[in-house]
Amino acid sequence: MKLCDIRRKVTNALGGADGARRECDLLISHVYGVDAADIPLHMFDELEYDATLDGMIARRTSGEPLEYIIGRTVFCDLDFFVTPSCLIPQADTEVVAREAARLDGGRFLDLCTGSGCIAVFLAKRGARGVAVDISGAALDIARKNAELNGVSDKIEFVEADVFAPLDIGAGFDVIVSNPPYVRSGEIDSLSREVRHEPRIALDGGADGLDFYRRIASVAGELLAPRGALVCEIGYDEAADVLSILSAHGFSGRVTKDYGGRDRCVVAVKTDRRTT
């Protein structure tokens, strides 16, 4: 069977749209070990159809994210492992990582690290830090990603509950976080792909703001005197998050994502509390 025929069969099974072609190439790359970008160069190669593809197609058409099926994704041009134990790094979160990297700080704290994508990106840029998550399974993936990207010696991984006392030291130049921020009542209405991701990494409480309240309450003690806080936010949460931060003596600004929506808050300590 020619590769072009396999490609046609898989693309049609996935739905035949433009997005299906891209996903088809990633599945073929995963199964046959051909770089997705090189598939057009091998279209007439004779290959045996691998029935593994059928199982992958069934998983994808049922709504399981492609990244979980192939076990990998790309974030800020770096490769990462992903499993259903952690959120899939998204392009919107790249804005958060790049904002944190722009700050003049060599020591970071990544709260709710998940796959470790932000921590690994900062470490690749020369910083050192601590990455915290409540999920031991997610931390296992984060450690693998640090090893994959050659920065294991720059990140300390700590399993801890952000809502409990954090015994992780202080004096961090940057605290960065992509915390759970979906309103509890809205989770079941999310896309079926997102509903495959761990609920614990999505659920931000009744109003989606529980983690921002907690982070704001401890950030002042954890940051160095001129340190900064960088958080991903829901597209409609900017005003509420800025208000929470202001109540704890922080002054912040909002950065938009690639789609032009509010996505990131960068805040510094002013000690002028509003409460």
Image: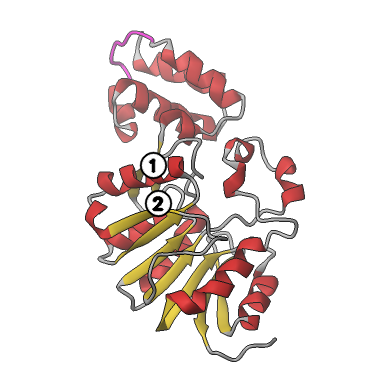
Badge 2 element: loop
Q: Work out which residue is located at the far bottom of the displayed protein and give it.
A: 272
Q: Which residue is mark 2?
A: 116
Apparent side of residue 217 relative to residue 42 in the rendered image (left or right): right
Image spot of residue 191 (x, y percent) = 67, 40
Crowd class of label 1 (few under 14; some 14 to 19; many from 20; radius 10 Å): many
Residue at (49, 16) in percent of width and height: 55
Q: Is residue 44 magenta?
A: yes
Quick one: label 1 or label 2, which is nearer the N terminus? 2
Whether pointer 1 and pointer 2 mark residues with C-beta atoms closer than 8 Å, the reply is yes
Q: Residue at x 57, y 73 (%)?
A: 216
Residue annotated with mark 1: 141
Q: Can you say which quadrant of the picture contains the C terminus?
A: bottom right
- Residue 12 can be seen in this image: no
Is residue 45 among what the camera can see?
yes
Residue 174: x, y in percent?
41, 73
Amino acid bearing label 1: Ile
- Left or right of 177? Residue 217 is right
Q: Nearer the viewer, residue 204 or 36?
A: 204
x and y, in percent, of residue 181 in the image: 63, 57
**Quadrant including the N terminus:** top left
- The residue at 70%/72% (across/down) is 240
What residue do we see at 43% from left, 39% from top? 82
Number of marks: 2
Give the extent of the magenta segment.
43-49
**Which percent across, then down, holds residue 203?**
65, 50
Q: Amino acid at mark 2?
A: Gly
